[in-house]
Image (cartoon, coloured by chain):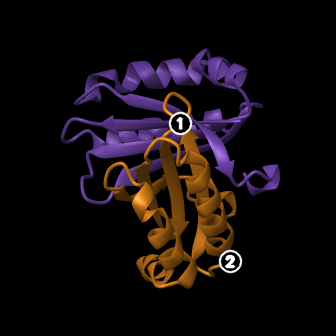
Chain colours: A orange, B purple
Amino acid sequence: MIVYCVEVQVVPGKEEDFKAASLKNHQETRKEPGNIRFDVLQQSEDKSRFFLYEAYSSQEAVIAHKETAHYLEWRETVAPWMAAPRKGTSHSVCAPLEPGQW
Amino acid sequence: MIVYCVEVQVVPGKEEDFKAASLKNHQETRKEPGNIRFDVLQQSEDKSRFFLYEAYSSQEAVIAHKETAHYLEWRETVAPWMAAPRKGTSHSVCAPLEPGQW
């Protein structure tokens, strides 16, 4: 299992557009067989910063996600709204280890 | 609902100790009525970096967590293992909004 965290900063005024595009990506990604979570968060202190918390069953599932139409559409849609390059980081899970807790 | 993300960097050689202490904190925190998730992750590229993903039902639940014996014990236990100050960030949730998805 892999958890991929993505830090996003959008240009001012594009927060609601980013939310809408990411909600659509969330809904479609959750239907992927290898996706376990796809949380979209907005930073409380700085509303221009978002955080994506994506859990997948395997590295293959991460690769499969990046080939989906909804991911490619999201990537293209949000590209002009990025105030800085997105920063993604992969993690292994220490807890919880029970699959039912995900 | 609030999601609190904490970035941690431990001193080399203390990774397993940090994991063990954080697993205990995870187990006890999940019993708190206001806690919804408490994930402990380890960065794939740099094993000295950890990430805590903590979801609470309210700001009051966050405050209550910080007053628990298990949190205070964890904080004291891990203090000498910190390679840098921990960085915590609060978030609101854009998705999923269904409580059953948490």
Identify the residue at image location x=44%, y=30%: B88
Q: Is residue A10 left or right of residue B79?
A: right
Q: Which residue is mark 2?
A: A31
Give the quarter of the image for residue A82.
bottom left
**What x and y, as percent, mark residue A63?**
42, 81
| Secondary structure of residue under mark 1 | loop
| Mark 1 residue crowding within 10 angstroms, few (<14) / some (14–19) / many (20+) | some
Amino acid type, mark 2: Lys
Residue B88 - label: none
Identify the residue at image location x=41%, y=77%: A59
Identify the residue at image location x=74%, y=33%: B57
Identify the residue at image location x=56%, y=42%: A42
Chain of residue at mark 1:
A
Nearest the camera: A25 or B54? Answer: A25
Q: Is residue B92 left or right of residue A45?
A: right
Nearest the camera: A46 or A61? Answer: A46
Q: Which residue is mark 1?
A: A47
Give the quarter of the image for residue A91.
bottom left
**What x and y, as percent, mark residue A34?**
57, 78
